[in-house]
Image: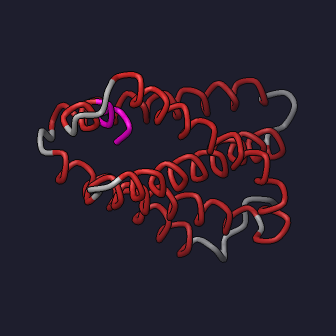
Amino acid sequence: TTITLPVQLHQSGVSETTAGFYLAFISFMAVIGAFFMPKVVERLQEKSTLIAAYSLYGIAQILFAFTNSWFTLILAAVAMGMGFGLSIPLVNHITIELSDSSIRNTQLAYLSMAIFSGQFLSSVLAEMIDDHLALYLCTTFLAFITAITLIAMRGLRFRA
């Protein structure tokens, strides 16, 4: 996960400055993904966009697991950032649109708690699994299981 990424980069001989620039590049890719998210949703619809986002997360985790070059690290950064940029703003938008105005703030608070809980749980997972390869394969599995679940739910509607 991106929580262990700085450690992995350091162990590979990457300087702190370069690692910082690399993590900033992932964030920049997230901004690019968020910029294009409305166009992607227009073309793919909401659920398929979320499937694509989680697939990108999974691809990024596989690349992080088996990376041995800057080329694959750059591909992983693009996939990770785009996955984030396509998913988080979209889920926020869906929450706003589906929530009655009387409970919208509560629903957005629950969404924020869910997102931050995910970040917390990834730290716990990183502490439980000491091996980087096993950790990345575990997170790959979780990302693809989420994508497959969304595919299975494709017939169900978000909206009434």
Looking at the image, residue 1 sits to the left or right of residue 56; the answer is: left
Q: What is the x, y in percent for residue 6?
A: 32, 31
Q: Residue at x 49, y 48 (%)?
A: 77
Q: Start and end of the magenta stretch?
A: 1-6
- Residue 79: % across, % down: 52, 56
Taking the image as shown, residue 141 lies to the left or right of residue 113, namely left
Residue at image coords 32%, 37%: 5
Res 3 → quadrant: top left
Compared across the picture, whether 93 is left or right of 126 comes to right
Image quadrant containing the C terminus: bottom right
Q: Main secondary structure of the magenta part?
A: loop
Q: Residue at x 62, y 59 (%)?
A: 50
Please state which of residues 22 and 134 is positioned toward the viewer in this rendering. Answer: 22
Q: Nearer the viewer, residue 151 or 51?
A: 51
- In percent of width and height, residue 143 lies at 42, 58
Residue at the spot x=84%, y=27% of the render?
A: 102
Residue 56 picture location, percent across and down: 52, 60
Q: Is residue 89 or residue 68 the one in the foreground?
A: 68
Q: Is residue 152 above or below residue 69?
A: below
The quadrant holding residue 28 is: top right
Q: Is residue 72 magenta?
A: no
